[in-house]
Structure formats: structure tokens, C-alpha cells
Amino acid sequence: MKKIFKNSIVTFLLTFIVLAVFPTTAFAQEFEPRLTAPQGEPYYTSELNAYSQTGYGMPNCVAYAFGRIYELNGERPLIDHGNAGEWWFINKSNSYYDYGSEPKLGAIACWSGHVAVVEDIAKDGAITVSESHWGGNYFNTNTYYDMSSHYGQYFYGYIYAYNEPAEEEDPKPQGAYKMEEQYFEPQEMTCFTALEFSQSSNTIMNPKINYLLNK
């Protein structure tokens, strides 16, 4: 028990030292997919959700997408109005977020009448989205291989509203300065014994009397 406690203290101290020496070092947070319905988180309620505040909360695809991006980024999404068919054009006309045809985690998938959020991208190309439906399901997930097949609606593409954490760079090593070889000139060293030193009456330490050094 004492050993476990001691190891815990050591781990805590090492963590504290690392953060003190490298204050800009941060531990990257991995993307956590939402595969279950919200349970009262403020991002999806009238406390923070722009659509819920105006009476158009969940079940509603835009209310959900707004809340999900809010939850992922920790800040209010720039797209905070309009219906699902307008989000793609609102974003383009205002240059809020980058957009494109490549699926990315946290991206908003936009159709002509629906929006959803990408939660997982499998190696075989399967794309899992989380979504809500106006007048329908409060929350559900779906997996697609062809995004254009969503209820026969036209697929516009993806809005990259999720602020993916930047990759961290390793801190530069704080190594000792190494002199270049071409500038290093080894110096001749003179050794003397304790007897020689005592017989010199300390003259060996006098720079003006250096004959002992040159014997």
C-alpha cells in the first residue's frame, strides 16, 4: 500500500514538473463520437441552443447539429439560423467554415433538406452520422456508403465546423552546447604532485613564476 501511494506521489510530481517546464504542452483530446441521445446537456436545450431558444428545439436536425458542434468545440457555432436546406449556402456566403466533399470527423453533412454530424469513418468507407428529425426521431445514428441516398435528397457536401485539435510539436531538446570540432583546440595540461607543490612554496600558483610549469 505504501509503495502504491509512493508511486502516485511520484507520478503527480513528474506531471507537475512537465507542465511547469513546458507550460504550452497540452494533452490532445481525442474525438469522442456521440452514439447515444443527449441527456439534457445545455448545448441541446434552451440554455445554450439557439433553435431551442426560439421554439424550434429537438427533435430538429438543425437544432441537433447546432448543439453537437457547440458540444465539440466548446463555443457557439457561427451558423445559428436557417433551416437545413439553407445551412450549406449560409456557410458559403458568409465564409464561416471550410467545406468540401471529403468526410471528416465532426463535419456537418448537408443535404437539400437535412443536416447531420459525422461521428465515425470506417476503413471500408462507411460513414456514421448522428442526427435528429423534425417531427420524427429525437435522435438516431445512421451509417452510409453513399451519402446521396439519404431519403432521395441531394447531397451538397460537408461543412468542416469542428475545430480539430492541432497536432502538437515535440519541444526542442534542451541539450548542452556542443562546440564545432574545427574550433576546438585541445590544450596541453601540466600535472604536478603534492610534493612538487609543497616544495614550490606555492610559487606554482603565481603566474609570474611559471618555471615549475615548464619543467
Image (cartoon, rainbow, N blue to C red):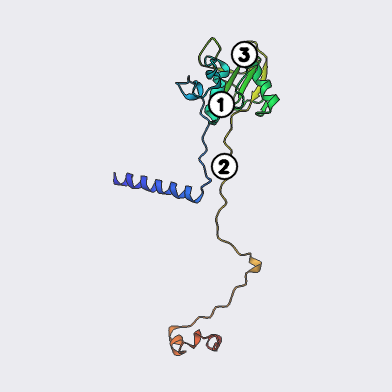
For the residues labelled 1 and 2, the Cα–Cα distance comes to 23 Å
Q: Amino acid at mark 1?
A: Ile
Residue positioned most to the right: 93
Q: Which label sits on residue 69?
A: 1
Q: What element does badge 2 sit on?
A: loop
Q: Residue at 52% x, 12% y: name it.
A: 137
Q: Residue at 49% x, 23% y: name it.
A: 47
**Visible residue check, residue 130:** no
Q: Earlier along the polypeptide chain: callout 3 or callout 2?
A: 3
Q: Earlier along the polypeptide chain: callout 3 or callout 1?
A: 1
Q: Amino acid at mark 3?
A: His
Q: Which label sits on residue 46?
A: none
**Visible residue check, residue 195:** yes
Q: Position of residue 83 (x, y in %)?
A: 62, 16
| Count of numbered marks | 3
Q: Amino acid at mark 2?
A: Glu
Q: Position of residue 31 (x, y in %)?
A: 53, 30
Q: What element does badge 3 sit on?
A: loop
Q: What element does badge 1 sit on?
A: helix
Residue on which disc 3 sits: 150
**Do the residues under discs 3 and 1 have CB atoms within 8 angstroms?**
no
For the residues labelled 3 and 2, the Cα–Cα distance comes to 37 Å
Q: Position of residue 196 (x, y in %)?
A: 46, 87
Q: Earlier along the polypeptide chain: callout 1 or callout 2?
A: 1
Disc 1 vs disc 2: which is toward the camera? 1
Residue on which disc 2 sits: 168
